[in-house]
Image: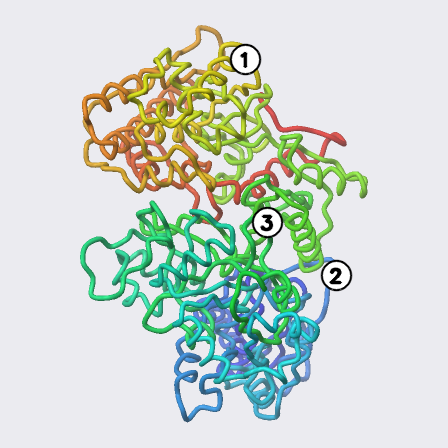
Amino acid sequence: MRGLVQGVGFRPFVHALARRHGLTGHVGNDSSGVFIEVQGPPTAVEDFQRDLLERRPPLAVIDAVGVEELPAREERDFVIVESRRLDDLSTPISPDIATCDDCLRELFDPADRRYRYPFLNCTNCGPRFTIVRDIPYDRAQTTMAGFPMCPACAAEYHDPTNRRFHAQPNACPACGPRLWLVPSARASDAAARPVDYGPWPQGEEALRLAREALAGGQVVAIKGLGGFHLACDATDAEAVARLRARKGRVDKPFALMAASAASACAFVEIDAHEERLLTSRARPIVLLRRRTGPTDVRPIAEGVAPGNAFLGVMLPYTPLHHLLVGDRPLVMTSGNLSDEPIARDNAEALARLASLADAFLLHDRPIHAVCDDSVVRAFDGAEAPVRRSRGYAPFPVAWPGSGSGPTVLAVGGELKATFCLARPPYAYLSQHIGDMGNLETLEAFARAEAHFRALFRAEPAVVACDSHPGYLSARWAGRFAEGRGLPLIAVQHHHAHAASVMLEHGLDGSRPVIGVILDGTGYGLDGAIWGGEVLLADYRGFRRLAHLKYIPLPGGDAAIHRPYRSALAHLWAAGLPWDDDLPCVAACPEAERRVLRRQLERGLNCVPTSSMGRLFDAVAALIGVRQTVTYEAQAAIEMESRCDARDEGAWGAFALEVPEADGPVVVDPAPLLRTIAAELRRGVPGTVLAGRFHHAVAGAVVELARWARDHTGVDSVALSGGVFQNMLLLRRAADRLHHEGFEVLVHRRVPANDGGLSLGQAAVASAIQGGDPVASSGAR
């Protein structure tokens, strides 16, 4: 049996099923999955095989079954045998799973021996990926190896009828991990002995003190499944402000943890699809619209998500969370300074977070793999991933076609970094690593990559990276490939986006798709910054069918941090004057305006760009939403939050410049910008203009798709790139494309942003198969 069949109660299930059917034989784990030998009457064997698939455990995913006939042998029983290691094979590892209902009942049952024990788990829930050091998945290969089971736990572990039969993290208060609390003032003392809980309040006393600290407005660093959180009372404006100041996080939203979906309904709107995501086994952060109007409960502090109509909400996913979260929701943000990796172990947290936290709630179960919380939005009754990490990673994406090809290591991009280790028939996408802007994140990336290679028995034959020569990930890939004598394939950014959505939909690449890729930044084949692209793409290459008209971006990154500069550049390119009554003009100091005009007129330090992300920034600044930003896409996110999307009538549109020769269509936003400026002067509210702009972009997507279909005969459209995390735009574009008869492919397994880039890079590199020592994906 191949698939997700380890760490999910599969061997106990097989054991019970074989005995129920009166069969003899054995079951065990190996590096490729689970092996089973059964012997008995033919009808009983057939019934067993049927039930094996139809009644499998709830967490199991079966990808393939191989069956062969064997000669009968002398057997008396059906048993679970020792695991065996096959160095040339690999099997998927289960993500960490939220606490199940059975364990929750035990957690709050005073008669149960695990009553209020923060680390209880069973075969159906608890830590998996974050504690696994190696496969096969057995206790000795996890961070629980240092906790020998007491007789009661060992009896459960060896009892085939028990829910904890072969549950590798099985533990109780007598033999398992312990919890203790350290005040920040004593952090340096504790750091000297990071797993010594003797001098500190433990267990219930530690929990009580932590809850009191949170209720009193303090910040508590909490060691969780995949790293540390920084927590505070989400209804306490002063506590939230202190956390922001200490963490150096100006505006970027914090995530919340509520006790239940019912309690979260007091401050956010939740539909049936969103509730299903909230309560799923993965327990991701779900982006939900704020509830407006009066409320009977204490409101969420505005500083949790300033300027944002959405809140990121998750529910408790460990017993410790269930014991901590009370009537008031908690801010639960990553335990780090902004832009640094999450703290993993006690000593590291006590050193790095001492200036951020007032107290530390620690435990002594080691974390092997750091894993941040996942983030999703609901779209069309299913999930649209924003950040794929805890609860999802490292579950693989199935490789399409024959499931063959070279092993590829693809290292992703610069922002929202992930890597992908593709060893057909699986592509193992890493957990979210972070933005590759510093040495600490690069080191975390290297540790995670080495862990994957060991865990999945995969040494790459090909390395893939982004084609941007300045990316740290690309430089790392170059050193890695050179050191091992491997071919390096540089994959164009937007080609990788198109390939990622193709692969997650199981396309084998035999027919191309129309890839509409809208994002902020991607290095183009001509050296310009691309980001508003329509491609005819398969895995081996692409042709650029259309793009946003290039505009000069003065100062490069300065324009990203100050959207008013993007707005002024777009106005200049459209031939519109910089009049002081326009918000973006008023926001720019006169001296800076003079410099910008000189840059634009002379082309000094101006990077040509076709970025849709920068156009969103420009419009947000033009209508007065946001002139400067402190985190990526802030202006666009706040504009989506403020949209009045009800007005769908005819309005300003992009101009399409269709070439006479065989070149790309150029999409000029100038007419649209003229209309927005004129409507703004007429007093049309910015919320209405924001909604109309979204409709105009969706209309342009459909018009370009129609043009592409007319000229190529292709009717499948793949939507990717970070701009399509905007659910209003995605909804409008997808609905209209469906209405026009297109097959529409959107992301369901990996993010539309750069977090899904590595999957596409792996698909492209596998198709090219390494050819030259250094190769690039490019136009055909």
Residue designated by label 3: 427
Give the image quarter of residue 590: top left
Asked if residue 256 is positioned above or below residue 645 in the image, the reply reads below
The front one of 360 and 401 is 360
Pick the front one: 5 or 515: 515
Which of the 4 image quarters holds residue 447? bottom right
**Which comes before the other along the chain, label 1 or label 2?**
2
482 lies above or below 11: above
Residue 728 position (above or below residue 146): above
- Please tell me whether mark 3 sits on a helix, a strand or a loop: strand
Q: Is residue 124 left or right of residue 176?
A: left
The answer to which of 391 and 164 lies nearer the viewer is 391
Residue 314, image x, y percentages: 39, 61
Residue 61: percent from left, percent from top = 50, 62
**Badge number at residue 78:** none
Furthest residue in direction top, as rendered? 660
Q: Residue at x 63, y 85 (%)?
A: 198
On the image, numbered disc 1 is attached to which residue? 603
Front: mark 3 or 1: 1
> What's the residue type where badge 3 is placed?
Ala
- Percent across and percent down for residue 7 are 56, 70
Q: Are marks 3 and 1 in contact (CB under 8 Å)?
A: no
The kind of secondary structure element at disc 2 is loop
Q: Looking at the image, which residue is at 48% across and 73% down?
A: 124
Q: Which amino acid lies under the numbered mark 1 shown in the image of this protein? A: Gly
- Sooner in the amino-acid sequence: mark 3 or mark 1: 3
Q: CA distance from mark 2 to mark 3?
A: 18 Å
Q: Amino acid at mark 2?
A: Asp
Question: Mark 1 against mark 2, which lies toward the viewer?
Answer: 1
Few, some or many C-alpha atoms within 10 Å of disc 3 (few <14, some 14-19, many ≥20)?
Answer: many
Disc 2: which residue: 87
